[in-house]
Amino acid sequence: MALQVICDIDKRIIAIHAGCTGSVHDATVFKRMNVYKNPDQYFTRGEYLLSDSVYSVSTTCVPAFRKQMEVVERNQLFNTCLAKARIRNEHCIGILKNRWECLKEMRVWIKGAKEVQYIVDLVSACCVLHNMLADLGDSWLEMDVPPDEVEAIDRPLNEGNAFQADEVKAFREAVQAETLRIIYGDPML
């Protein structure tokens, strides 16, 4: 079963989607999430998610550049910065699975909707408990955010989410330029 996890900078889970079969592509699972369908309910001006290259670029989702675009040095540097920030999500999932061993291998024979709902409920409960333990300051050192990691870019770029393709491309380029300016001091490498 596929599980889509979105976490914040502190590795606290802010959105999940469970219930799709493992054969469903991650980008398709994301498109089934409310955070994708109704971005105005989840994002304020200038907020966005960082993702890998399989996701579509939008004003609320900034993916890495695909391999064929990495020939441009700026794109390659931007992808490196994104990877350093996105690793938090992988760490969050690792912490979640290590806290709740049942998530590593569920031995549930799925005969119908009842068993799928059981798994969704179990995963949801584990995510809620993960956040509760993080808020209580449990002993998981991985929850600490190293101060030298990439800062979130929160400069507002436009109002709303009704963007045309040109505006979405410009949004991504603006995020890229600001990231490269912060990290490398020069956005025009």
Image (cartoon, rainbow, N blue to C red):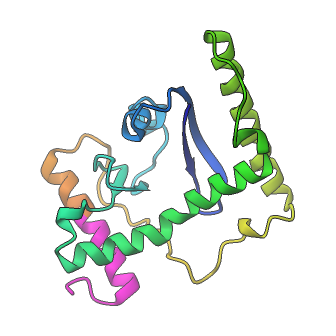
Quadrant (top left/top right/bottom left/bottom right) for the N terminus: top right
User: Taking 149 as reference, is 77 left or right?
Assistant: left
Q: Could you tell me residue 178's position as x and y percent?
A: 32, 75
Q: Residue furthest bottom?
A: 185
Quadrant (top left/top right/bottom left/bottom right) for the C terminus: bottom left
Residue occupying image coordinates x 69% and y 34%: 123
Magenta residues, start to end: 173-189
User: Taking 130 as reference, is 115 left or right?
Assistant: left
- 20 over 114 or under it: above or below: below
Q: Residue 64 occupies which quadrant of the picture?
A: bottom left
Q: Could you tell me residue 92's position as x and y percent?
A: 64, 56
Residue occupying image coordinates x 74% and y 30%: 122
Q: Could you tell me residue 56's position as x and y percent?
A: 29, 46
Residue occupying image coordinates x 59% and y 56%: 8
- 7 over 80 or under it: above or below: above
Q: What secondary structure is the magenta-colored segment mainly?
A: helix
- 180 over 28 or under it: above or below: below
Q: Could you tell me residue 139's position as x and y percent?
A: 86, 65
Determine if the magenta segment contains residue 95.
Answer: no
Residue occupying image coordinates x 46% and y 46%: 43
The answer to whether residue 177 of the structure is visible from this angle is no
The answer to whether residue 16 of the structure is visible from this angle is yes
User: Taking 149 as reference, is 23 left or right?
Assistant: left
Determine if the magenta segment contains residue 182.
Answer: yes
Q: Nearer the viewer, residue 171 or 71?
A: 71
Q: Nearer the viewer, residue 152 or 124?
A: 124
- 88 over 118 or under it: above or below: below
